[in-house]
Image: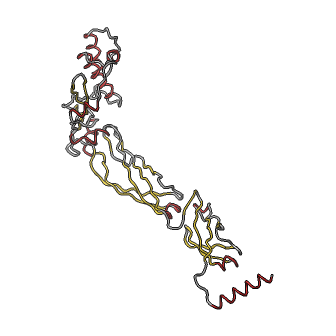
Amino acid sequence: MKTAEQCYGTFGLSINASDEEVKTVYREMVKQYHPDKNSAPEAREKFIEIQQAYESIVNKNFASNRQHVNMEDLFSQFGGFDFGPFANSIVHAGRNQDRSFSMSISFIEACLGVTKTISYTYQSACKGCEEHSKQHGKINVFSCSQCSGLGFLRRNVGPVSISQPCGSCAGVGTMLKCETCKGQGAVPDKKQISFKINPGMEDGSVVKFDSQGDFNYKTNSYGNVFVKLSITPHPTITRNGVDVFSRLKVPYLDCILGCDVEFESIHGIDKINIPPLTEAGAIVKKSNVGINNVGGHFLTIDVEMPKLINNTEKKLLNKIRNLKLKN
């Protein structure tokens, strides 16, 4: 609720203006900003402001700095308000309708890039409304009779006047007459989008598709579609930036003597050289096999010890040990 100064200020008048002066300016501004005659986005908000200010002046119902009402207690006394079947649409009235989806992709797909497809049902522009607009220059919109085009209903609770969105027009102030869409301005339809996920996409990244969401006849435009990506972890490979990391078990003799061993990379099975006398925990790098073939694959070596050795192996190892002792 506004103060007296604010209410009179809405009409460009001082608080000492007469009722007749207020009424004259009020009528002129109503004609100027009425939603049926002014299609500007800000016209409806201005029209509501005019109505509220005029009602406050007529009823001498202004905000006071000394008056305080606990609104939570006030609503609880009356059990809240029922907005009927339009309860969900009230929040979105006059806005584009965006759609959000979640999609899981594998770790390898995130590293290499992949093409994915989403299929969904959305609200498409009503052909019946479009045809009426072509024939008459505009869609068949009329002021809501329930709220007189204001978009809200007012009720007095003690010293406080409370406004609630109109359940008939979903708080818009106007209603649409069309047999095709039953006044919704849009009809359900199906859509499919194929899109490419670039290599190196991060977990939690959001891909946006402009104007692929639901149609809103108030703004004559479509909302957007957002797809949030969730990357399923790989059992053995991790990633940081363009580099990837894993561990590699190498038999102890190969670590001593050196060899070429196979390992699992994001591109499939690859080979890397293990230098002689490689110790446990050492890190070897295969270059240009990371993200976009730019980063590297870093492998931490785990020395694999045998669980059993036969007599021949034991004799050979003892010979090697004796040689080391002699040297």
Q: Return the residue nearer the eye: 225 or 167.
A: 167
Q: Residue at x 34, y 12 (%)?
A: 13
**Is residue 192 left or right of 152 when viewed as pictured?**
right
Residue at (77% x, 82% y) in the render: 325
Q: In which quarter of the image is the N terminus?
A: top left
Residue 210 place in picture, x, y as percent: 42, 47
Quadrant location of the C terminus in the rendered image: bottom right
Task: Say which residue appears at 35% left-offset and 41% top-offset.
Answer: 96
Q: Quadrant of residue 272?
A: bottom right
Q: So how many labels did they put on this image?
A: 0
Q: Position of residue 74 (x, y in %)?
A: 25, 30
View extreme (bottom): residue: 312
Residue 117, picture quadrant: bottom left
Q: In this view, does 15 lie above or below 315?
A: above
| In the depicted structure, whether residue 37 falls above or below residue 302 | above
Query: Is the residue 47 above or below the residue 242 in the image?
Result: above
Query: Closest to the observer: 26 or 65?
Result: 65
Residue 53 screen position, x and y as percent: 29, 20
> Residue at horizontal 65%, vertical 66%?
285
Is any atom of residue 30 visible in this view? yes
Whether residue 284 appears in this view of the structure is: no
Colour style of the rendered protein structure: secondary structure
List x then y, in percent, for residue 282. 66, 68
Judged left or right of residue 205, residue 326 is right
